[in-house]
Amino acid sequence: MVKTAILVSGGGTNLQAIIDAKRAGEIPAAELSLVIASNDKAYALERARLAGIPTAVVHKEKGEDIAHYGERLLEVLHGHNIDVAVLAGFLTILPENVIRAYDHRIINIHPSLIPSFCGEGFYGLKVHEAALQKGVKVTGATVHFVNEIPDGGDIIAQKAVEVLPGDTPEILQKRVMEQAEWLLLPRALQEVASQLDK
Ligand code: GAR
């Protein structure tokens, strides 16, 4: 089984979807070995504890050199023999040394159909605000490999979701999570892990 770390910053509903899919036997290729949070207030940490998954908090200190922060992250990842990392609502840009060390072994979920509404500054509700402002009729979610370009790596999976009249960013976010993110991310993890598990 491929040892997997899930990196989180907030509520952790995508982490929960992975935990639930693992319990349902839908991710046989991956072991959920570690949850790393960017801050100790993330509710995702509680979800990890309830599921019995070891946790760590690695916070980028103010003024810390980005490469140094990357080294600290790598120490934790290597310390747990992690093969694959999943960014599940992880809102810190990953340092290049981490991306290089885990080339095509880090995946990210983004709440739009890339290349729309993505890149630096597009995260969480901001993505849905931008989609509504543009007036698109269809949005969705994307899982992709992480490279040095924010939201620019190879696409693994996408799913479209309708935008409906009267949508607010919050309503749209919830629909995109329910109809796309929570299905796509566990499947993509199984796909990537099974390739590495050979
Ligand atoms: C999710 O919608 C995820 O796609 C998004 O943050 C939310 C985290 O929710 N990620 C990004 O915007 C990354 N650019 P969660 O903590 O409940 O999984």
Image: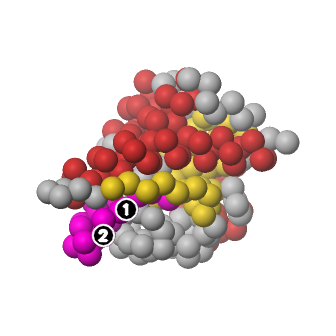
- Left or right: where does residue 1 sit relative to residue 20? right
- Residue type at mark 2? Val
Residue for badge 2: 136
Q: Is residue 136 magenta?
A: yes
**Can you say whether 185 is above or below 32 in the image?**
below
Residue for badge 1: 139
**Can you say whether 166 is above or below 26 in the image?**
below
Start-end of magenta stretch: 124-142
- Residue type at mark 1? Thr
Image point (52%, 36%), residue name: 18
Residue 81 appearing in the image: no
Q: Find out if the beta carbon at label 1 lies less than 8 Å from the nearest ligand 1 atom.
A: no
Say few, some or many: other residues with alpha carbon within 10 Å of mark 2 (under 14 / 14 to 19 / 20 or more): few
Q: Nearer the viewer, residue 138 or 132?
A: 138
Residue 42, position in %: x, y?
Answer: 35, 44
Q: Nearer the viewer, residue 111 or 161?
A: 161
Under circle 1, the secondary element is strand
Residue 102, position in %: x, y?
Answer: 70, 59
